Image: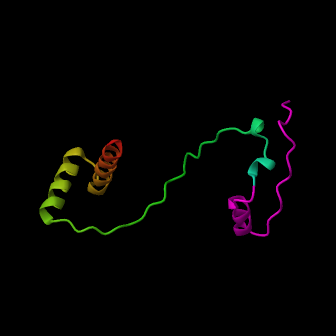
Amino acid sequence: MNKPTHKTKAPPKFRSEAKEREFWESKDNDATQFFDPAKTSAVTFKNLKPSTTSISIRLSDSLLDGIRQQANKLDVPYQSLMKVWLTEKLREAAKE
């Protein structure tokens, strides 16, 4: 059994999720007091989806038709293709 690298405190009890969030997000609070780093492990949230926001964008009919035609050729939804293209362009711009 691993010995703690330092003495840890028990986390406080909270009346609500909001109070708990406030506690852990406080700059005055050091979370390392409550957890032993030697006992931590990495986790993966397989079903966690990033937050999304709907937007409205005006495109010319010809541009939208071209995007839809390309999406049909690739057999993907046109909005998904637009997201891929925007992501690729953003990555390119970030490299500059």
- Residue at the (79%, 41%) spot, across then down: 36
15 horizontally vs 59: left or right: right
Taking the image as shown, residue 1 lies to the left or right of residue 75, namely: right
**Residue, far top:** 1
Identify the residue at image location x=30%, y=57%: 79
Res. 34 in view: no
Quarter of the image for residue 25 reads bottom right
* Residue range (magenta): 1-29
**20 in the magenta segment:** yes
The verdict on residue 23 being magenta is yes
Residue depicted at x 75% and y 51%: 31
Residue 61 coordinates in the image, percent (x, y)? 14, 65
Q: Position of residue 41 (x, y in %)?
A: 69, 38
**Residue 96 in the image: above or below residue 79:** above
| Magenta span: chief secondary structure | loop
Q: Quadrant of the N terminus?
A: top right
Classify residue 84 as left or right of residue 49.
left
Identify which residue is drawn at 85% across, 46% down: 8
Q: Quadrant of the C terminus?
A: top left
- Toward the left, the furthest residue is 62
Residue 79 in sight from this viewpoint: yes
